[in-house]
Every structure is written in C-alpha cells, then in structure tokens.
Image: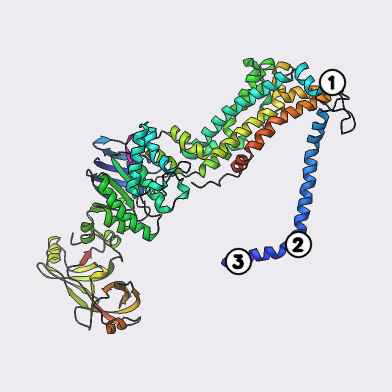
Amino acid sequence: MATVKLTNVKKVYDNNVVAVHDFNLDIADKEFVVFVGPSGCGKSTTLRMIAGLEEISDGTIEIDGEVVNDLQPKDRNIAMVFQNYALYPHLTVFENMAFSLRLKHVPQEEVYERVTKAAEILGITEYLLRKPRALSGGQRQRVAIGRAMVRDSKVFLMDEPLSNLDAKLRNAMRAEIILLRQKLDTTFIYVTHDQTEAMTLGDRIVIMKDGFIQQVGTPTEVFENPKNLFVAEFIGAPKMNIMEAQLLRKGPSDYCVVVNDAVMQIDINHCSRLEANNVQSGKITLGIRPEHVTICKEKAPNNMACRLEVNEMMGSELHLHVTDVNGDKLIVRTPTVDLTPEERAGFRNGAEIYITFHGKAMYFFDPETENSLID
Amino acid sequence: MKKNAETLPQKRHMGMSTKGKISNTLIYILLVVIVIIWIIPFVFILLESFRCETQGMAGYVVPKQWGFDNYVRLLTQTDFLKWYGNTLLIAVVTAVLQTIIVLCMSYTLSRLRFKGRRFLMNFMLVLGMFPGFLTLIVLYKVLSGMGLTGPNAVPGLILVYCASSGMGYYVSKGYFDTIPKSLDEAARMDGATRFQVFRKVIMPLAKPIVIYTILSAFMAPWGDFIFARYIAHGSSAGYNVAVGLWSWTTKTSVGTQYTMFCAGGVLVALPITILFMILQRYYVEGVTGGAVKG
C-alpha cells in the first residue's frame, strides 16, 4: 500500500535511443493504473524502471515519498508478474510461491499459512506440489500472481500478464484480476497493449506513444474526451472512423460540419466547446465511432452515400465496412435486433447505403497538430 | 511444407527395406572396426599390468602367469602413491577453483552489461586459440622466482591451471544464455541479491553445465604432462602420475619397470572412467546445451 510518484523520468539507452521522455505521474494509494500503448511506446520500460530492473537516466521515482532511484529491486518492496510467468522451473509451485519468504527467513508455519492462503484464493491448492512444467498456461499465470501475492508488497506490478493466454482464458483471468484487486487492496500498475484490458481494469489509464504520455484519465474520460487523434483511435474497438471534413461556423456557438455532400448538425455542448477554443471555419479531421454512425433509409441533406464492401455478422450486431465517394473507409456498427429481414437482405456487398453521424458523438481534431478541438 | 512432412516418413520407410539396410550395415561394420582399433591399446595395457613372468616387454599379448605382483610393487616400492596424491590434490583443487571462476565469469558475461564486455569476450576467445604451452618458459621463470618449481611444483601447477580458467567461459555462457533473463529478474524482485539469484535459481537449472565444467576442469590437470614435467623438472616429489610413469619408460628402466608402468596406467584411468560413467548423462546434456526450456 503506497503512493508512487514519477517526476520527469527519462530513459535513454546506451545506443542513445530515448525510450521514455519526461514521464510525470502521481499514483495514489490503492489506485489501479494501466499503462497502455502500442509496442515500443515505453510502457514496459517505465514499469521496469519502477521495479528497479532498468536504470533511470533522469528524474526521480518515489515510492511512499522515498526516492528509490538507487535502490536495488529487492529493497523496493515491489511485487511483479511477468509476461512469460518466469516461474522457477526447478521448484514446485509451493516453493515458487514461498521463494521470497524463504529469502527473508520467514518461519516455516507462516510460509505455509501464507502460501496456502494465496493458493486458495487463486484456486491452485491441488497443484502446489507440481512443477511448473506440469501446469497449463492459465495455471502458470495464477502461480505467477500467487508468487507476487504472498509478499506484503507496497506495489503490485504486472507486465502484460495476460498476453500469453488464449482469448477465452484472457477474459476469465481479466475478471479474476479485478476480484484479486479487491481482495489485495493495494496499488497496482498494469502494462498492456490491449485497450480492452486497459478500459476494464484501470481506475486510470496512461496512454503512451513513442515514449510520450498522450493522455492520463479514467476509462470514461479517455473514451469520451480523447485529447488527440492517437488516443481517439487507440481507445475503442473497432477503432474510431477518421475522415476529412469542413467545419462551418455559422455564428457564435453555432457550428455545423460538412462531410462530402452531407451537412450535419453538431450538439450544442460541442458547439460551445468549439466556441470556447475559438475554432473558426475550415478543414478539420473528423472522428466518429462506429457505433455512433446511423444508417438512413433514404438520401437526405444530412446523410451521405456509401458503398458497402464487407458485411461482418458479429451475432448481436453487424460490422459494415463501407467506402464513401472519396474512397475513405469507415466501419458502421449496427445492432441486429431491430433489423427487419428486408433490411438485412439489403446489406449485401456492393449495395449503396446512406449514413449520418450522431451530433453528440462527433470528434474534431486539428489536421496539423492532431489535438482535439473540443477538449 | 505440410505436404513434405506427410510424404517424408513414407519415403524413408520405403528406403529402409533396400538401400537403408545396406548402408546401416556398412555404418555398423565401420563403427565396430573403429571401436576395436580404439580399445586395443587399453586391453593391451590391462593385460600387461597382470603379467608376472617378466617385468619388461614380453613380445606377446596374453600373459603366461597372471597376478597382482605389479600392483603390489607399484604401491609398496615406488613413489607412485606420492605422485598419485600430488595429481589428485592438483586436480581436485583445480576442479573446484576453476569451476567457481568459470561459472562466475560466464554468468557475468551472460547477464551483466558493462563497458568493454564484447571486447573482453573476443579478446579471450582469440587468446584461447593459442596453445597454452607457448607461455611455458615465462611461466617457469615466474614460478621459479616464487619458489614453486621442483619439489614445490604442486601449488605451482595449481596456480598455472587456475590462472587462465576464466577464458573457458564460452560453453557455459552459451548455456546460461538459454536460461530466460526474466527468471533472474523475478528472483531479484522476490528479494534475492545477484549472488542469491546465481546460487538459488541459476545453479540448479545449470546442473549439466556445472558437471561438464567440473569434469573438464578435473581431467585437464589429471592427464597433463608438458607443464607438469617442466615445472617439476626432475624432482620426484613434485611429479604427477603422468610424469612419474613416464620416467619409467626410459631406456634404462623400461626393461624392469614396463609392466609396473602399465599397472600405473590402469590406476590412472580408473577414477576418470568411473567419474565419466556416473556423470555421462549430464556431460552429454552439458555439451549439447540449449535443450533446456525456461
């Protein structure tokens, strides 16, 4: 249980590659923070610097107010779960979990008690006497988590713990991590490249790219108010549709957007934010999430014609891949429940459909800086 | 790719009935011939060591009178036990020290990154390509200055054998490289020092390579002749078995000590053979390395 504070943390490798630029973050006690970003964005490096496995080139890392820059990993009182589990192959599951306690010369009874308790929580009691190689991937991952659990560490680090598991198991383990977090009630820092994990697990999400923090916020904040185009595209699946459009300022706090031949109204809230940011008429980058695209029955001034290329049946919804007159590709999500059989039959490849965008759900970005205009 | 995998075993099976059988037979015949050639000297020495009718060379193979006379004479009337003790002491101490040095060195080179690491590795690799006895004369001078030659050759030889042992890092470093680094990291997070990581995680996983290192570190001094002969230079108290036994094969002594020489040879081969048979399994695993999954 501890706070973690990173101030101007920087990582430069020997070959002068800068992995992390000027990283600033305050993590509160018992908070669950997720670092997310594409591979090579510096998220794992940052985590490893907190762990002490990677030297800090510049800046300071504090745990519970104490600067830990020069402390060895063993002196930081941090537990970590690795992507490839990193279980000791020559030790049984019990001894794997007891390893840290043995190093600290914890009395035998206490070791037994703590290991069996953790094993019970994780449901691996029956495997305690097995060697790791006799376990499945999911079981190994539990042991790895158990090994971190038995220690009363201040901070719990997880480096892509689920990415070696298959999709089904990953979903199950994700739910278990949420339960585990409630039980342990300690500070978590979790690294992943998977936005779903980030959204479902994190109290706060740190989105990184090329060593820079792009945005820090709650899942709702980063989903609803992405600061820039990168965050907007990274969070949400399928990803946000991006296209060029014209913004028209008709008067104070009165804007509309022109996409191809369609003129779409913008919600009053967004208008006032555009006004507050002093945005004038001109070319912008428009973002719209697939679920906020509406299909219209016939051509109207506020919708545009598109050609349907691919129709993916996902069960409860359809993912329609469409192309507009400029060749821009968009994805439209539409629930299947309200569709009539005729409508469904109409969604055949090559068909022309008309779409319009939800006025409350459009995002506007500066084409130059890629920053949000309604932030 | 997949098609190949399906058709290949079939082809091999078909070949087995005709061509395969012939080539297999030929290979086995060749192997048997090699084994016979290989084993003949050992059989001769063994037979010679039990010969009682003469103490010199007999000119025929099978002894006419069998017995342990040569062994008794060897152990009671000569310096053999002293030489044997010298060799054992040198080999054991060298094996222990060299193993520690080599393993620490290889682990360091495998795990730690420091300035000049690559240069050091290449430098030692190139240096190791020169035969060791190039340094013979210099080493003799140095050791003689320290008073570690002649009758005091034993500590001198230990020094020589251990001195450059760090250069033998190559095989074990290769093995350590196959053990995932995240195991080290996990152990360090669990509260282990670098040395505890080495001792409690890496060593148990590296058993084959540890045994390989011990064996090779033991065998080199056990059978060494060149260094041992020069550094002991004519002082029987400093001989190892190889030099001692060799001293019986000179023109003047070979007539009376040849069978005893053979008995000595058998006793020298014994411990190595036993060691090898016990540890063979690990040895093969160690040399072929890399087969371990983290």
Point out residue A22 in the picture as x, y percentages from the top left corner: 29, 45
The image quarter in which residue B210 lies: top right
Circle 3: residue type:
Glu
Relative placement, left or right, of A307 versus A86 is left
Residue, disc 3: B6
Q: Which chain letter matches label 2?
A: B
Q: Is residue B159 magenta?
A: no
Task: Tell me, yes or no, whether the two marked residues, 3 and 1, touch with CB atoms within 8 Å.
Answer: no
Q: Quadrant of the N terminus of chain B?
A: bottom right
Q: Residue at x 62, y 16 (%)?
A: B146
Mark 1: secondary structure: loop
**What is the residue that sits farthest to the right in this orientation?**
B59
User: Looking at the image, which residue is at 37% across and 52% down?
Assistant: A40
- Label 1 amino acid? Ser
Q: CA distance from mark 3 to mark 2?
A: 21 Å
SS at mark 3 in the image: helix
The amino acid sitting under disc 2 is Lys
* Residue range (magenta): A75-80
Disc nearest the viewer among 3 and 1:
3
Above or below residue B32? Residue A229 is below
Q: Which mark is residue A135?
A: none
Judge the density around disc 1: few (<14), some (14-19), many (≥20) Cα neighbours within 10 Å. Answer: few
Q: Which residue is mark 2?
A: B19
Chain of the residue that carries numbered disc 1 in the rendered image = B
Q: Is residue B194 visible?
A: yes
Residue A227 point in image, percent of width and height: 23, 58
The answer to which image quadrant residue B170 occupies is: top right
Per the model, the C-alpha gap separating discs 1 and 2 is 56 Å
**Residue B219 or residue A39, whichever sits in front:** B219
Q: Of the residues tagged 1 and 2, which is closer to the observer?
A: 2
The residue identified by callout 1 is B253
